[in-house]
Amino acid sequence: MDVTLRGLDTADIPAWNHLLAEAEKVDETGEHYNEADLAEEMANPDIEPSKDLVGAFLGEEMVGYFSVYARSAAGEVQKIHLSGVVRPDHRGEGIGSVLAEAMHSRALEAHRERPPQLSALLTLSGPSDNAAQAQLMADIGLRPERWGFTMRAHLPDLPETAAMVPEGLELRRYDDSYAAAMHAAHNAAFVDHPNFTPWSDSMWKQWVTESRNFRPGVSFVVVDPTQPDEVVAYVQTNEYDAYQQQTGRREAYVGKVGTRREYRGRGLASTLLAHALRAYRDAGYDEASLDVDSENPTGALGIYRRAGFEVEKRFTDYIATVAPNGSPTA
């Protein structure tokens, strides 16, 4: 197969968008993109598109791609997120193997470009029923180690539930004055979660506060008036207009929900979700979705089910650890 790999630039966005749309028709991951979403991703200051966004081409035709995204380091680990896909009409031709090998090589190179004394954690998430992807990951040394779920709630069907805020706390609609406090709360709330890497300022701006998909009007925080500069719990919402373009339904995506450890056990997550779901419905959304890690130590899966979400799809996280010297570890 005479396939050529090269870095993507803005001129490739229409072809990249078409590739992802064709793959979604078959893979049904529930993820939809448009050209504006991809332009935002390409503008991420933490990547080098010429190295970290790479397309596979047959002649002038884009038939696959991979991405490599090295996160900010935390502790002794440098987390590197991987993703990629082959257009369905060219699967089974060896393109996936070419992309997987090149993606792995770039990930190791990205590791060497960062602090050399750290180990790297390579991660890729994909539908658990994709056996071909599982084999490709095994071929480059990534093994299935964790699982997650996409969950969905149909807003017209939700029962009316009370959203009582515990005494001494206040629920408020998000505004820009809470940007730094919500960022700090997120890093504090997830510090005890497996493989969590704190979000850097640049990453938070890229994917939350300055993202075209962020919906502050249906995002909420809980504050303790005795500590007015601190957010103790939050729900942060996105909307991807590509989803409505493809399905005809408006979806509110629960990007983040969390509670600081010292405030857990008071029902704040349930209160925030109940309030947010009603706000979504009142704002004209048809459904809400979220992703949850099966190893979430706070029992989030049960909280989401009680709020009205049901499991829609199961995903597998493929993981490999690379030692500071670049060699794989057991």
Image: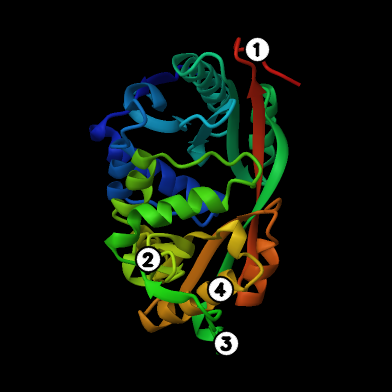
Q: Nearer the viewer, mark 4 or mark 1?
A: 1
**Quick one: 228 or 269, which is closer to the camera?**
228
Q: Nearer the viewer, mark 4 or mark 2?
A: 4
Could you say where residue 142 lies in the image, as x and y percent from the top left? 67, 28
Which of the two labelled residues, at mark 2 and mark 1, occupies the earlier sequence position? Answer: 2
> Can you say whether 35 is above or below 110 in the image?
below
Kind of residue at badge 4: Ala
Query: CB atoms at circles 2 and 3 under 8 Å apart?
Result: no
Which of the two labelled residues, at mark 4 and mark 1, occupies the earlier sequence position? Answer: 4
Disc 1 target residue: 327
Q: Secondary structure at mark 1?
A: loop
Mark-to-mark CA distance, 3 and 4: 14 Å
Dot 3 alpha-carbon crowd within 10 angstroms: few under 14, some 14 to 19, many 20 or more: few
Disc 2 target residue: 244
Q: Nearer the viewer, mark 2 or mark 3?
A: 3
Kind of residue at badge 3: Thr
Name the outermost residue toward the left: 11
Disc 4 target residue: 153
Could you say where residue 235 lies in the image, as x and y percent from the top left? 47, 65
Kind of residue at badge 2: Gln
Q: Residue at x 65, y 65 (%)?
A: 311
Disc 3 target residue: 161
Q: Secondary structure at mark 3?
A: loop
Could you say where residue 10 lies in the image, as x and y percent from the top left? 24, 34
Q: Secondary structure at mark 4?
A: strand
Which of the two labelled residues, at mark 3 and mark 4, occupies the earlier sequence position? Answer: 4
Dot 4 alpha-carbon crowd within 10 angstroms: few under 14, some 14 to 19, many 20 or more: many
Which of the two labelled residues, at mark 4 and mark 2, occupies the earlier sequence position? Answer: 4
Kind of residue at badge 1: Ser
Q: Residue at x 33, y 27 (%)?
A: 49
